[in-house]
């Protein structure tokens, strides 16, 4: 059956630019379409399938939970998978972060963080605090609260009248700056923009600051200099505002530590998790909060928030088995080791393709950016639509990568190469082979 030729399905969520084949089976880092064509899942979907596809331990855990019960409402019953997953999650968090609130995805996790932060302010007599400062560009989800924090017009444009936009400071795109400062000095300069914004907004109105410690789709694996993280933390503490980390993409081992926060020993007040947390086996996310924050809200009458599917036993059984696999297979260590190799390989491409301007990331959250002039990081002209064409060149050769065109006040095309954390060194070779062939074909399009 040629599905490419069939009309769009009556599926509201059909929105990709191009019809894609029906998915067939998926195993490890590979996905086959219904016609048996194989693809390397070089972006783990949207940085989700961290432990790879078809993991038998997870499937067994889900089967056995399904045989018992798939749903019992949380106001009527506790459930063991949720209890165990909460304990295991808390054990992987920095000291004190041990109150876990389950949700069904990243937007819900961020939404829950916003609401807990606000309720905490009310519970502690600081009603005037309601603004959460975020960064531009950034992506924190598509529900209206999370969207108010998101710095991406593409996503928020039509909804502007309905949003109460939160204040934004520029993301630390230090690699774009052309000045005499060192990277560490630039990091401080970007972090100090947080202080300026707090002062501008009025410190008594500011509730928190949210960031992705390693950037995701909006900035393409953006990592700031160490100085940035130190200074941001100091500023949050100085003004008594909450540090909220959106680790929906960077968490669950993706950067080579369970939380990206660990690279800088960050002590967040609230963390949002999803994506790799259940690695695509079930819709699941979590908001994890400092004990005293959650307890103050509970003492003041309880968290005024909730979702029907929160703490669903089947989703939690999947999440529990995923975390067990991350530990058993030592996937954080593998993400570091294989990530270093992939990073070196991607950096090596710069010598061969003058239009590769920057390669960045941590662990297996990696990206490269295409430019017309690497010295000045001038973006490729929009008309080239590099973010579409290179992805298509790769897709047609059986490699899936993830792309976006956006960057700070400027614009640019970045490509995320983020295979599952189970990827072997040999499989990095496979990815690079297809990527190089795709870049060759793409470069024929360019006349720079
Ligand atoms: N936060 C970050 C950093 C993300 O990357 C995403 C999704 O891409 C979200 C939040 C929203 O997650 P979801 O699409 O599961 O609602």
Image (cartoon, rainbow, N blue to C red):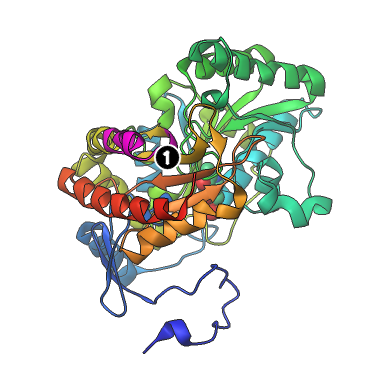
Q: Could you tell whether 190 is left or right of 323 in the image? A: right
Q: Nearer the viewer, residue 135 or 102?
A: 135
Residue 101 seen by the camera: no
At x 41% / y 33%, what residue is drawn?
Answer: 360
Task: Tell me residue 110's x, y (percent).
Answer: 59, 44
Number of labels in the image equals: 1
Q: Secondary structure at mark 1?
A: strand
In the rendered image, residue 354 lying in the magenta stretch gets the answer yes
Q: Could you tell whether 414 is left or right of 21 in the image? A: right
- Residue where numbered disc 1 is placed: 368
Task: Tell me residue 10's x, y (percent).
Answer: 58, 83
Task: Tell me residue 382's x, y (percent).
Answer: 61, 50
At x 47% / y 22%, what residue is drawn?
Answer: 266
Q: Nearer the viewer, residue 348 or 424?
A: 348
The span shown in magenta is 343-358
| Residue 329: quadrant of the picture | top left
Farthest left residue? 426
Crowding around mark 1 (Cα neighbors within 10 Å: few <14, some 14 to 19, many 20+) is many
| Residue 136: quadrant of the picture | top right
| Residue 354: quadrant of the picture | top left
Q: Main secondary structure of the magenta part?
A: helix
Task: Tell me residue 380's x, y (percent).
Answer: 55, 44
At x 67% / y 21%, what residue is drawn?
Answer: 194
Farthest front residue? 447
């Amino acid at each position: 059956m040629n599905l490419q030729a069939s009309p769009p399905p009556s599926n509201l969520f059909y929105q990709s630019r191009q019809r894609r084949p029906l998915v067939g089976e998926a195993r490890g880092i590979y996905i086959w379409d219904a016609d048996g064509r194989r693809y390397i899942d070089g972006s783990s979907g949207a940085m989700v399938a961290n432990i790879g596809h078809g993991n038998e331990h997870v499937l067994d855990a889900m089967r056995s939970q399904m045989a018992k019960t798939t749903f019992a409402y949380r106001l009527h019953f506790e459930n063991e998978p949720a209890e165990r997953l909460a304990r295991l999650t808390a054990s992987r968090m920095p000291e004190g972060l041990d109150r876990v609130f389950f949700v069904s995805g990243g937007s819900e996790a961020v939404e829950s963080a916003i609401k807990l932060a606000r309720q905490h302010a009310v519970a502690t007599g600081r009603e005037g605090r309601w603004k959460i400062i975020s960064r531009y560009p950034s992506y924190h989800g598509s529900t209206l609260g999370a969207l108010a924090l998101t710095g991406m017009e593409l996503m928020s444009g039509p909804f502007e009248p309905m949003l109460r936009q939160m204040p934004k400071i520029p993301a630390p795109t230090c690699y774009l700056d052309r000045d005499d400062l060192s990277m560490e000095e630039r990091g401080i300069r970007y972090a100090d923009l947080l202080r300026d914004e707090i002062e501008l907004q009025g410190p008594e109105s500011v509730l928190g600051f949210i960031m992705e410690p390693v950037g995701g789709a909006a900035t393409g694996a953006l990592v700031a200099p160490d100085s940035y993280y130190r200074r941001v933390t100091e500023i949050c503490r100085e003004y008594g505002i909450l540090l909220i980390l959106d680790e929906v993409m960077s968490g669950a081992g993706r950067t080579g530590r369970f939380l990206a926060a660990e690279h800088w020993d960050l002590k967040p007040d609230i963390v949002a998790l999803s994506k790799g947390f259940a690695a695509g086996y079930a819709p699941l996310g979590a908001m994890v909060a400092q004990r005293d924050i959650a307890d103050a809200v509970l003492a003041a009458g309880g968290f005024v928030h909730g979702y029907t599917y929160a703490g669903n036993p089947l989703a939690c059984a999947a999440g529990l088995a995923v975390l067990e696999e991350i530990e058993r297979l030592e996937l954080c260590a593998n993400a570091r080791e294989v990530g270093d190799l992939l990073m070196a390989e991607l950096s090596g491409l710069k010598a061969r393709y003058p239009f590769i301007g920057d390669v960045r990331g941590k662990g297996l959250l990696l990206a490269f950016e295409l430019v017309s002039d690497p010295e000045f990081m001038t973006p490729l002209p929009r008309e080239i639509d590099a973010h579409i064409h290179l992805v298509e060149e790769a897709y047609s050769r059986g490699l899936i990568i993830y792309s976006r065109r956006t960057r700070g006040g400027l614009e640019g095309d970045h490509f995320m190469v983020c295979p599952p954390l189970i990827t072997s060194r040999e499989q990095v070779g496979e990815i690079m082979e297809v990527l190089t062939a795709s870049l060759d074909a793409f470069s024929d399009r360019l006349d720079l």
